Every structure is written in structure tokens, then in C-alpha cells.
Amino acid sequence: VRAPMVAANWKMNGSRAICREFLQHFDVDGSLDVVLFPPFLYTSILTEGFAERSISVGVQNVCNVSSGAYTGEISAEMAVDSGATYGLVGHSERRNLFGESDVLVAEKFMACQRAGLTPVLCVGESFEERLEGRAESVVAGQIDVILKSVGIKTFANAVIAYEPVWAIGTGETARPDQAQSMHAFIRAFLTKFDATTAENTRVLYGGSVNASTAAELFAEGDIDGGLVGGASLEFKEFAKICRSVSR
Ligand code: PGA
């Protein structure tokens, strides 16, 4: 049985004040895995503050190497040292705005696993790719690149987030049946390599999830929770989304 997970991707938003709001007011039922992905600088504030509660903290990016002369970069080892336990990899904003290639995404995935961070691999097609009928092949390709580097077994310690690029930050959530169909496709694709891993890997949906769309999405059989951007900075809204997970 896959434990549901709801994750907050703050992107380049938030502040120490917002961290304090979450520390004071945000709490959830312990049977749900909740992960906050704040900007790097706020990792320790949250990991230290949430130490007694079952709320995890992750980083939005890691460097592909562990240490050295890489001015401005932060390694997965440093994220672990600050108490983080998850790392986002391959978010479409990193791919599109910062030119991250499939190869670099695979290296970052491996860097997370080497350091002991659970990678959350983001995949998803653009609007044009969907129109052209290529959504599934694009997503399969993005997962395949990682599978070729690390093998199916390491996916036992990874999470996948399906985030159609056309739904990110646009207010246009994928319909639950549309998302479910891609999630089922992802699981079927993994099954070709290893059925047990496919059955156990959590696949989250991301793209304009909010408190009014979450419950319907999370009710679908292959949607194991969500990766929430814009609606995750306000602790009340995010708590509502977390409570939308049906058990
Ligand atoms: P959004 O972002 O919820 O603001 O669409 C989701 C994401 O990019 O992870």
C-alpha cells in the first residue's frame, strides 16, 4: 500500500515570517507524509522547528557534484546536513528556465540518492506535446533517461511527480480522469521493468492543485497525492489540501 504524500513547492517565494507561521500553525495528521520544499535558505529553520512533528523538509534543487569549486551551488550532502530528506529533481522550471538537460537531471537524481535524499522526479509534457499526441512518449522518455542511469531498483527510494507543464501556475488543473490516465500509464511503464517497484512507487500530481480541486484528484486510484506550488504558501489553504487525501 502506497502511503499518500502531499508536498509544498514554494519555488522562489516565502520568507522567515512565513516559515514562522507554518511552525506556529501548521500541523497534520501523522499518517500522511507531508513535505515542505522551501528555498534553500529556510531549510534549517523548518527542519529544526519541525523536528518533533512528522513534517519533512526537502530542497528544490541540488548540485550534481558533492563539493568543490562550484561558486553558488549547494550539494545534496549539505541539504542532508541541514536536515532535509527529499530533493526535487527535473522540475519543468529548472528544465526550461535554467536549461537543465536530461543528463544533468539524471546526475542530480543520483546525487540525491548518494547523499541520502529521496529524489522527487518531476516529469510532464508541454501543451504542444499534448496537442501533438506525444504526452505519454515524452513522459516515458523523461523517466527512461533516469532508469537507464540508475536502474529500476533505485526507484524503490524515489517519488515521481507528474506535472503537465500547461497546468503549472496557470490555474488550469488537469481533469482528474486526464491525470489518472497519465498516472496509470506511468505505473504501467514502470511495470515493464519491475512490477513490485511499479506498485510501490508513489506518483504525485502537480499543476494548479488547490483546496477545491485536490479531493477529486487525490481520489483517483493511481494519484498518490500532490505537489502543490502557488496554493502551498498559505498554511490554511495547504492544510486543507492535505486534508483532502482520502484514506
Ligand atoms: P502550481 O505549481 O501548483 O503553482 O501550479 C506546481 C509546481 O510547479 O510544482
Image (cartoon, grey):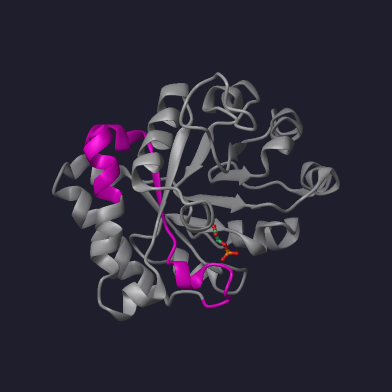
Residue at the limit of the structure toward the right, as seen here: 17
Observer-nearest of 135 and 158:
135
Does the stretch in magenta take in 56? Answer: no
Quarter in which the N terminus is drawn: top left
Residue plotted at (69% across, 28% down): 51
Q: Is residue 86 above or below residue 245?
A: above
Q: Residue 201 appears at what percent x and percent y?
A: 33, 45
* Rendered image quadrant of residue 126: bottom left
Does the stretch in magenta take in 148? Answer: yes
Residue plotted at (36% across, 76% down): 128
Task: Tell me if I can see residue 120 in this picture.
Answer: yes
In the rendered structure, the answer to whether residue 118 lies left or right of residue 211 reads: left
Q: Is residue 119 above or below residue 168?
A: above
Looking at the rendering, the stretch of residues picked out in magenta corresponds to: 143-172
Q: Residue 142 appears at what percent x and percent y?
A: 31, 52
Q: Is residue 201 above or below residue 126?
A: above
In the rendered structure, the answer to whether residue 210 lies left or right of residue 141 reads: right
Observer-nearest of 32 and 85:
85
Q: Is residue 208 above or below residue 82?
A: below
Q: Quadrant of ligand 1?
A: bottom right
Q: Residue 74 appears at what percent x and percent y?
A: 60, 30
Residue at the limit of the structure toward the left, as seen here: 192
How many numbered callouts? 0
Residue plotted at (47% across, 52% down): 99
Q: Residue 207 appears at what percent x and percent y?
A: 51, 66
* Rendered image quadrant of residue 151: top left
* Rendered image quadrant of residue 231: bottom right
Observer-nearest of 122 and 182:
122
Task: Tell me if I can see residue 1 in this picture.
Answer: no
Residue plotted at (65% across, 47% down): 28
